[in-house]
Structures are given as C-alpha cells and as structure tokens.
Image: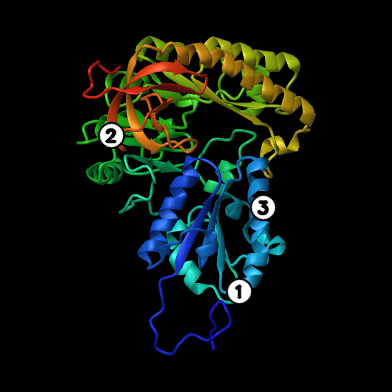
C-alpha cells in the first residue's frame, strides 16, 4: 500500500489534494521562460504553486550549463536536498534543462535521490513524466522531442512584461559553447504562432515583450525566405496594447541592414541592442570561431549608432580564453572604449565538455582571469557613469515594475533601452510613467515620477 510522506497510509476513497510544485531557476532568460513553460504544464496537469521549497511536493530545478560556475552552483544547491528527500521520501525532485541534457542518466550516479532527469525538449511532458515516477525507479527523458511553446497564462511576477521564445537551439559552432549540444539545432517558430501568443499576452495587459533566441537575429533561417527577424518585427509592430518590443541575444554575423532599419523605423522596437563581442582581439575571435573581426563588429556598431536614435548597446565578453595574451586583452579594452556600452556582462572562461575549446590548453591562470574580469568591470564603470549622468535633467518614459527588492521606499522601473530607474512609490505598477531624472550611478538612474506627464518623455 502506498504511504504518505509521514509514513501513514492514505485514507481509502479520500480525494487527494493537488500536489504543490516549486521551481528553482538557474541561468539566463531562456531558462526563466523554460521554467514558465514547465510550470504551466504542471499547473494545467492539476498541480498548484507551493509557497516555497519547504511546502512543496514536487521540486523542479531548471538548470544552466553554459558556464562551469552556473553548473557548480546548481550542483551545490541540489546536494543540499538529499537530507530533505530522506526526511520526506514522497517528495519528487526533478532536474530539468541544460544540465539534464548534458549529463543525462549519469546525474543519477552522483545524485541517486533525483526522480526525474528532463532534457531541454521535454518540459511540456513534465506532468506525464512525473506521473510515471516510482520509488527507486527514476526516469530520464533527453534528446529529440516535439516542443510546445504557447502559454495560456502569464507566470511572470512582472505583470506588464513577458519573454516570448521565437526559436530554439543553435546551429553555429562557437568553440567555447555547449548550447548546440544541449539545445539542439536552430528551429524557428512560425510567425503567425508568435503573433497569436503576443496578442494574447497584450490582451492580458502585457506592454513589454522580449523575443528570445540563442542567436535571435538568425530567426527565420529554418523557415526559409522571406522569413527573418526584420520581417517578424514588422509583422508584430501593430499589435494593440504592445508598447515595447525588444530581442536578445544577437550575433554580429546576422546584424544586417534590414534588421538595423527595422529597429530604426518601427516605433515599438526598443533602441537597446545586446550584441556580444566576446573579445576585441582578432586572434582570439578566430580561435573562438566567431566569424567576424573586431573591425567588422565596430562597423556594425557605427551603422546602428548612425541610424537608430538613442542607440544603446550592451555586450558580453569572455576573459581568459585559451591563448589570450595581455595584448589580446588590451584589444578588448580598446573595443569597449570605442563602443561605449550602456552595460556589459563579463565572464571568466571555463571549458565545457564536448566543445572544441575544451581540447585547447586552459593556459590562462585563474588569478589572471580574475584580474582581467575585474579590470573590464572597472572600465565599464568608467564608461557607463557619464552615459548615465547624461540623463540627469531629462524626463524619460519608464515602465513601472513595482517595489524595489532593496528598499520598500523606492519603486523600480526600466527605460526603453533597459536602464534601471528608481523613484518614490507610485500607484502605477505595470504602467508607463514619466520620470524626471535627478541623479545617476553607473548602474541606475534616480528620479521622481511626474503626475500627469507635465514634460514630454523621451
């Protein structure tokens, strides 16, 4: 006879309460969207949201394998659940996403208390898979499967903002990147399906949509001509209620004139552009397999700056890639100074299994990687502070997100280009307001919301 978590048998004929599910999410926006898709499937299957891990009958980890640090952080977190599982044998623990796809059944050797290993193309099957779990008989579901995208509810805690996946996978071969092996080849969604999802979100009050893809500006290649990200943006621009449309993450190879013109000409499309460079050294870019030079990257930036009003670039960089010399690193610093990024994300290289770079000697010492990481972040502070201070005295359109996590005395919101804005509380969560900017750091703007919009927002 099956027993409850505390070891007592369930009452005969008594209706079972819905199982409570809790999600732990590691990694990027794509993982957050994956978690929403998986949670929606579980809610549709009869589960309810738990208040937290202590309250849950099912715990699902949505994982990231792009960098070793993210993977190690997840493993450390998962290990802490072994005792919890021992105390509550009926608790179901699922590992989903990139780490599940990368390691498959081998995860169970190190973490035998895990009940389900669910790969990146099986999130919509979570209710079915969890229903099949039996004591001491874990399930592994990885590899190819059909993928369901559409959501019928919004699980994003920010009611006016949403992520929408326009494609999955990646068909490029950057030497350091594990994504193609854990998410499969690039597959674009049909544009009419994407439009229906965004129309439904806008109908529920969503004003700000971010289109997601591993290389989002290669959208349409699997569909064939005339599909492209430029045509997709044009086809979404007239959706009623949609105020902002942006996209991440782009690859310089696919940043063509048609896309730049679409960003420049469609008022709903935001001027912030996340365009990872990864390095400013041509020698390093060549070893990375990035298919462009630093000079070509700067040409793209200058085209964007010339055509897109208020253009605000963001970037990614990897320090300590195999063979990176001090001269290579200084070329990266030079590129950052030339571009003048609004913000950057800097990562220390870590070899990922199965990638071409994993066969190269990891010859940059850890302390050098750490020092270069710190140097780029310090340089970015120098670059960003004057850019942010240029906004002082201006009135800017801000989408109100709600109370700041750090202080209930402030609300937080974002500009069209993604700058964080902090201001005294207003009764306008999820609304667009005008904020007069009064101060700035290299990370955020500070101001006051203007009642009635006395000044024109930029």
Q: Is 11 placed left or right of 352 in the picture?
A: left
Would you name the residue on which mark 3 appears?
75
Neighbours of disc 3 within 10 Å: few (<14), some (14-19), many (20+): some
Would you name the residue on which mark 2 appears?
431
Q: How are the residues colored?
A: rainbow
Between disc 2 and disc 1, the foreground one is 2
Across and down, in percent, residue 313 comes to: 46, 20
Residue 97 vs 381, above or below: the answer is below
Would you name the residue on which mark 1 appears?
89
Tell which circle, 2 or 3, labels the residue nearer the N-terminal end.
3
- Is residue 396 visible to us here? yes
Between disc 3 and disc 1, the foreground one is 1
Front residue of 227/55: it is 55
Query: Distance of mark 2 from mark 1, alpha carbons?
Result: 45 Å
Q: Do the residues labelled 2 and 3 touch (CB within 8 Å)?
A: no
Between disc 2 and disc 3, the foreground one is 2
- Is residue 220 visible to us here? no
For the C terminus, the image quarter is top left
Across and down, in percent, residue 129 comes to: 49, 67
Q: Residue at x 40, y 38 (%)?
A: 403
Neighbours of disc 2 within 10 Å: few (<14), some (14-19), many (20+): some
Neighbours of disc 1 within 10 Å: few (<14), some (14-19), many (20+): some
Query: Distance of mark 3 from mark 1, alpha carbons?
Result: 20 Å
């Amino acid at each position: 006879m099956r027993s409850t978590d505390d070891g007592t048998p369930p009452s005969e004929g008594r209706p079972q309460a819905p199982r409570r599910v809790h999600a732990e999410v590691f990694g990027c926006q794509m993982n957050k969207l994956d978690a929403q898709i998986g949670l929606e499937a579980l809610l549709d299957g009869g589960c309810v949201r738990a208040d937290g891990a202590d309250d849950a009958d099912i715990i699902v980890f949505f994982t990231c394998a792009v960098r070793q640090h993210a993977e190690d952080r997840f493993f450390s977190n998962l290990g802490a659940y072994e005792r919890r599982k021992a105390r509550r044998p009926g608790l179901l623990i699922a590992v989903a996403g990139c780490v599940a796809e990368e390691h498959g059944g081998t995860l169970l050797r190190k973490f035998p208390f895990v009940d389900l290993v669910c790969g990146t193309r099986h999130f919509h099957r979570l209710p079915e898979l969890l229903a099949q779990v039996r004591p001491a008989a874990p399930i592994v579901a990885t590899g190819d499967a059909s993928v369901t995208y559409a959501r019928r509810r919004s699980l994003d805690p920010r009611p006016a903002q949403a992520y929408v996946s326009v494609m999955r996978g990646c068909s490029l071969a950057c030497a350091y990147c594990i994504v193609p092996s854990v998410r499969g080849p690039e597959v674009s969604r049909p544009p009419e399906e994407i439009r229906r999802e965004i129309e439904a979100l806008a109908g529920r009050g969503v004003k700000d949509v971010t289109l997601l893809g591993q290389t989002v500006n290669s959208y349409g290649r699997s569909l064939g001509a005339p599909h492209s990200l430029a045509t997709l943006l044009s086809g979404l621009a007239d959706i009623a209620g949609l105020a902002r449309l942006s996209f991440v993450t782009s690859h310089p190879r696919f940043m063509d004139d048609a896309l730049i013109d679409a960003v420049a000409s469609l008022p709903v499309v935001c001027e912030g552009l996340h365009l990872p460079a990864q390095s400013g050294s041509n020698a390093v870019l060549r070893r990375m397999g990035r298919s462009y030079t630093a000079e070509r990257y700067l040409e793209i930036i200058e085209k964007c700056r010339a055509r897109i009003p208020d253009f605000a670039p963001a970037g990614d960089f990897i320090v300590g890639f195999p063979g990176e010399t001090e001269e290579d690193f200084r070329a990266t610093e030079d590129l950052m100074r030339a571009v003048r990024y609004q913000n950057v994300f800097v990562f220390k290289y870590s070899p990922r299994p199965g990638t071409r770079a994993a066969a190269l000697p990891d010859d940059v010492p850890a302390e050098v990687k750490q020092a270069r990481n710190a140097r780029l972040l310090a340089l970015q502070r120098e670059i960003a502070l004057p850019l942010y201070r240029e906004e002082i005295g201006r009135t800017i359109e801000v989408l109100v997100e709600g109370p700041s996590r750090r202080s209930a005395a402030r609300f937080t919101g974002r500009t069209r280009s993604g700058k964080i804005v902090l201001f005294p509380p207003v009764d306008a969560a999820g609304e667009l307001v005008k904020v007069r900017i009064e101060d700035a750091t290299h990370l955020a703007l500070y101001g006051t919301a203007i009642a009635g919009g006395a000044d024109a927002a930029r």
